[in-house]
Amino acid sequence: MTTARPARPARTDLTLTVEPFDSPDATALRDAQQAELDGRYDTDDHEPGVPPSAADVPVFVVARDSDGTPLGCGGLRLLDATSAELKRMYVVPAARGTGVSVAVLRSLEQEARARGLRDLLLETGTEQPDAMRFYEREGYHSIDPFGAYADSTQSVCYARAL
């Protein structure tokens, strides 16, 4: 069941591009995300399962402002023929609350639909209440932890039918 989203327009001054998972800007954004998560969880061991890589994330979106500064990112890791997992959703702190995350998420959803995917799943963590609020606001519903997250006490999982 698809939940209607509140009317919140995505930013129009952004450029969203699909690029390699290991491009320089994608790598810098993912490194910043990991550093932030290391601080939130007080450890660098907060990823159950196999970390995403260029080999298993065929779609990675980077959002840039009008000056070309990278502000946010996110990717899709295929789970099967009809579903994918959102990976490495991140927005730099200075751009949070400005619609970057909405724009990245909508771009990833559009990319997923274009590939014939029907469901998106994701994992976030107990120390990321801002992420939980965001996904709930955007129509994602809580699900039981899946896959590598099944036994993780810090994982909170969500899904949305496209």
Image (cartoon, grey):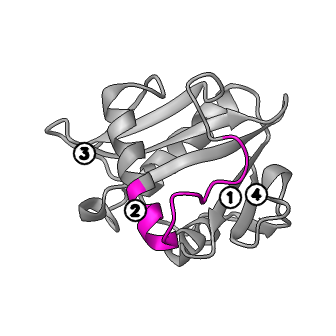
**Circle nearer the viewer, 3 or 1:** 1
Residue 112: name its quadrant: top right
Question: Secondary structure beneath disc 4?
Answer: strand
Q: Position of residue 121 (x, y in %)?
A: 74, 51
Disc assigned to residue 36? 2
Disc assigned to residue 93? none
Image: 61 above or below 71? above
Disc with the residue nearer the chain's start (3 vs 1):
3
Q: Position of residue 104 (x, y in %)?
A: 46, 46
Image: 60 above or below 93? above
Which residue is denoted by mark 3 in the rendering? 13
**Circle nearer the viewer, 3 or 4:** 4
Mark 3–mark 1 Cα distance, whole angstroms, equals 29 Å
Question: Secondary structure beneath disc 2?
Answer: helix
Q: Residue at x 52, y 71 (%)?
A: 41
Disc with the residue nearer the chain's start (3 vs 4):
3
Mark 4–mark 1 Cα distance, whole angstroms, equals 9 Å
Magenta residues? 35-50
**Circle nearer the viewer, 4 or 1:** 1
Q: Is residue 10 visible?
A: no
Image check: 45 left or right of 63? right
**Circle nearer the viewer, 3 or 2:** 2
- Callout 3, which amino acid? Asp
Mark 3–mark 4 Cα distance, whole angstroms, equals 28 Å
Disc with the residue nearer the chain's start (2 vs 4):
2
Crowd rating for badge 4 (residues with CA inside 10 Å; few <14, some 14–19, many 20+)? many
- Callout 2, which amino acid? Glu
Crowd rating for badge 3 (residues with CA inside 10 Å; few <14, some 14–19, many 20+)? few
Which residue is denoted by mark 4 in the rendering? 159
Disc with the residue nearer the chain's start (4 vs 1):
1
Q: Position of residue 28 (x, y in %)?
A: 32, 40
- Callout 4, which amino acid? Ala
